[in-house]
């Protein structure tokens, strides 16, 4: 049995899906989750906005001893998706400790930019 590593509660305060892309790559963001444990991790996400109610209870399973890259444009709950061109933040809750990283590919101009950071763990 492999033990879980990381934390159960993570925050990503700066989310934004650019509304346009240029060239062959599409602008996108991903929540990258590493589950070092033998058992599956049940992830529950909430998406917060500046001027509207959150999108809640987005469920994702990350199998044991695996990583999962979750495009934020695919996250939905109750038929609601994250709109492009709107700032948002993400709360990630897990039933076991995990590691969370956040990546953004900005392809709004010919010179693409890639940003990747470890999310903020809460203890």
Image (cartoon, rainbow, N blue to C red):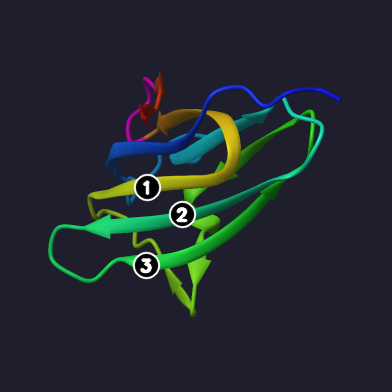
User: x, y (%) of residue 103?
Assistant: 45, 29
Residue 109 is one of the magenta-drawn residues: yes
Prevalent SS, magenta region: loop
Cβ atoms under marks 1 and 2 closer than 8 Å: yes
Callout 1: helix, strand or loop? strand
Label 3, label 1: how many angstroms apart (C-alpha)? 11 Å
Q: Residues within 10 Å of mark 1 (few under 14, many from 20)?
A: some
Whichever of labels 1 and 2 marks the residue nearer the N terminus, that label is: 2
- Residue indicated by mark 1: 91
In which quadrant is the N terminus drawn?
A: top right
Q: Is residue 37 above or below residue 90?
A: above
Residue at 35 percent of width and 57 percent of height: 47
Q: Position of residue 35 (x, y in %)?
A: 68, 30
Instruction: Give the numbered dot on residue 106.
Output: none
The CA distance from mark 2 to mark 3 is 8 Å
The answer to which image quadrant residue 6 occupies is: top right
Left or right relative to 17: residue 71: right
- Quadrant in which the C terminus appears: top left
Label of residue 55 in the image? 3
First reached walking from the N terminus: tag 3 or tag 1: 3
Q: Residue furthest left?
A: 51
Q: Which mark is residue 45?
A: 2
**Which residues lie in the magenta part?**
108-113
């Amino acid at each position: 049995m492999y033990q879980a590593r990381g934390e159960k509660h993570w925050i990503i305060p700066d989310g934004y899906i650019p509304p346009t892309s240029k060239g062959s790559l599409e602008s996108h963001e991903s929540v990258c989750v590493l589950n070092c444990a033998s058992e599956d991790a049940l992830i529950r996400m909430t998406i917060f906005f500046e001027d509207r109610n959150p999108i809640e209870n987005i469920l994702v399973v990350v199998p044991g001893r695996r990583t999962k890259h979750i495009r934020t444009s695919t996250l939905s709950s109750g038929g609601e998706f994250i709109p492009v061109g709107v700032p948002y933040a993400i709360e990630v809750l897990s039933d076991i400790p995990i590691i969370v990283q956040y990546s953004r590919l900005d392809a709004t101009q010919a010179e693409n930019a890639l940003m990747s950071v470890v999310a903020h763990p809460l203890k």
